[in-house]
Amino acid sequence: MPHKVTIPDYVIERIMAKRGKLSVFDSFEAAKTAFLVIDMQNFYVAEVDTAISIVPNVNRIAEACRAKGVPVVWVQMKCADKEGDPSQWPIYHDHFFTDAKAHNHLTKLSPGNPGYELYPDLDVKDDDVFVTKRRFSPFIVGASDLHERLQEMGIENLIVAGTATNMCSESTARDAMMLDYKVVMVEDANAARYDDDHLAGLTSFYQSFGDVKNTDDTIAMID
């Protein structure tokens, strides 16, 4: 089921007191915008109803972006170069999981395992952009080449969707703002396992890092 959450009044009041308006950015120039879809892989999506529920909105945004020449970038978590190889993030796998959970996470998020693949109901095109990352955020130094590729394309604005809202999506969106990108997180095209986690990710981002908009408003703001 989709998340049914509302940004709390105290957050809205704090935003209005801080900047005097709800939206930081009114529009994005299409030629300088990219759509990032974070970790919509079988491992994270296939058995999570909230993640499955955002697939239609992710596809809608992707279609609208392609029509306006906005690149669609599929970002995938890759824990090893191939299934059976050592972890590329040993501090995480060695300390934050039981042995069984670490093995499961490492194995299923490595190329060659079905868990690594993008969820099949996503509208993925061959000429989209594909990026792998080794950390929650692809913008951490050494985690991926996403920043360099976006700079080569002249990208200044980012639309962020995917899962989990309060983990990899929020980490990506926060780091992007810190690198001077203008960022929107799409509230109904991001998902977490629980409503409270989803809301926590959106509210913390909204107050100091960028905009939170729904799918319709996000599509409408692409100039």
Image: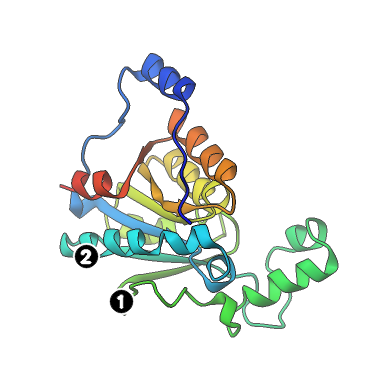
Mark 2: amino acid: Arg
User: How many marks on residues?
Assistant: 2
In this rendering, the answer to whether 40 lies above or below 180 is below
Residue 34 falls left or right of residue 17: left
Q: How is the image coloured?
A: rainbow
Q: Residue at x 58, y 41 (%)?
A: 196
Q: Position of residue 168 (x, y in %)?
A: 55, 53
| Residue holding disc 2 | 66
Number of other residues with Cα within 10 Å of mark 1, as a class: few under 14, some 14 to 19, many 20 or more:
few
Q: Quadrant of residue 181?
A: top left
Q: Residue furthest bottom?
A: 112
Answer with mark 1 or mark 2, whichever residue precedes in sequence: 2
Q: Residue at x 30, y 47 (%)?
A: 156
Of helix, strand and loop, which one carries label 2? helix
Q: Is residue 145 visible?
A: no
Q: Residue furthest right?
A: 99
Label 1 and label 2: CA atoms lie apart by 10 Å
| Residue holding disc 1 | 125
Q: Is residue 129 visible?
A: yes
Q: Position of residue 52 (x, y in %)?
A: 47, 64
Q: Residue furthest top?
A: 17
Decide: marks 1, 2 in contact (CB < 8 A)? Answer: yes
